[in-house]
Image: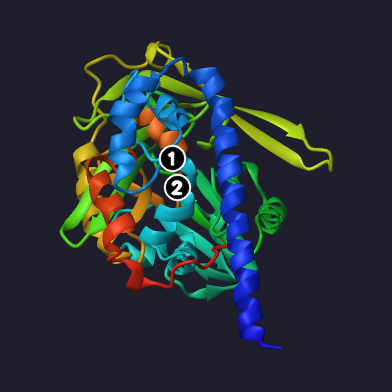
Amino acid sequence: MDYEKKFDETYSLARDYRRAYIRENVEKECQKVKEKVCSFSISDEDYENSILPYWKKYNVQPDKFWFEYYGSRDNRLDPKFIPGYMYYNDLIPYLNNLDFLRATADKCFFDIKFKKAKMPATICKCIGGLYYDSEMNMVSKDEAIRLCLDHDGKFIIKASVYTCSSRNTFSINPKEYDEKKICELFDSVGANFIVQDRVKQHKELAKFNPGTVNTIRVHSLLTADGVYIPSALLRVGSPEQDVVEMGNGGYLVGISDDNRLSETSYRTDVLVHFDEKGVEKHEYILVPTTDRMEGKYDDNYVIPSMDKIREKIKEIHPMIPHLKFVGWDFTVDEEGNPVLFEFNGSSDAQVYQLICCKPIFGDMTDWVLDDYFIHRTMEKNHKQGLIYI
């Protein structure tokens, strides 16, 4: 048997199945959200005269649904919005070498990789079941527990690999814990996690919800000419939670190029249900509101140190050159310093185009699409067509 040929055939079938699965589920998810948040309608004439001509040179006819969905916040007709399935199936695997995404995703190594950025102080780490202190010296599990109990103030324990949306992230007050409770918490998180000091955030971010460290997600595109930053939004946690988590009743708000928050904010809720096999499913719901998060900001509000965050991203993105398009999570501390939490090499396109009401690649959309569909300059960076599982 020609095993190599059989492998290629099997891999090809699996790749096609994955692409079809992503397309179906991304569209289904967005259709559900669209029913609740979108009343914007594009006429057939506008679709044929404004949207289709833009995509004609790429031999693509994206469905009108995507442009109604993404443009709904401001009733904006923009042909440069990127359909969700195209973003995940085509553009992200092209822009980012996903083999290196997995290799660089361990949060335990961010403080080593991004030394030019300020990050929360590390208390200890667990990497592959082995424990380390803040200087990467190996310690015992008991010593790691003691480092946590001796810490002055609250700290965060979070899973460092195979996680998203703040799952397996816990805010801990050591005064309420003993050695047994910390040990149980370590065991529940798994074999890969990091323990960090809880950042004291800037008062202008704390005003939205002082109980959570509210974060700013910023997207950046790395090119030979430098780093371009197309979009950003603010993520605010729920008063009932102690960490910012998608779907917990908090808010998402777009940030403009002049660092101001948009008038429309989106409350994030989640519906939990079980499928026919008894598997727990989470359905995220976005509810648009025009009360500026219940009056927590006005037209004159400006995100503190936003320009510093942009400059810091331009400084550190070149440290991960295999990943051309990245979403960064920052906050701002009490002194106004940007503090990096983590990055995401496959950041959500649906949510951010909707919330920000602008194309995910901004003014670089032509450059990205021309390169993917026509020039293919990044093709030799990595083998195309492999499945990232």
The answer to which of 385 and 168 lies nearer the viewer is 385
Q: Which amino acid type corresponds to the residue marked 1 in the rendered image? A: Pro
Residue ID at (65%, 46%) = 177
Q: Secondary structure at mark 2?
A: helix
The answer to which of 361 and 320 lies nearer the viewer is 361
Mark 1 crowd level (few <14, some 14–19, many ≥20, 10 Å Cα): many
Quarter of the view holding residue 362? top left
Q: Is residue 195 above or below residue 100?
A: above
Quarter of the view holding residue 376? bottom left
Q: Quadrant of the C terminus?
A: bottom right
Label pair 1/2, CB-CB below 8 angstroms: yes
Residue ID at (43%, 73%) = 383
Residue ID at (21%, 32%) = 257
Q: Which amino acid type corresponds to the residue marked 2 in the rendered image? A: Met
Q: Secondary structure at mark 1?
A: loop
Residue 352 image offset from top left, x and y in percent:
40, 36
To which residue does mark 2 refer?
86
To which residue does mark 1 refer?
83
In the displayed image of the protein, which residue is found farthest to the bottom?
Answer: 1
Residue 60 image offset from top left, x and y in percent:
39, 45
Judge left or right: residue 231 versus residue 10.
left
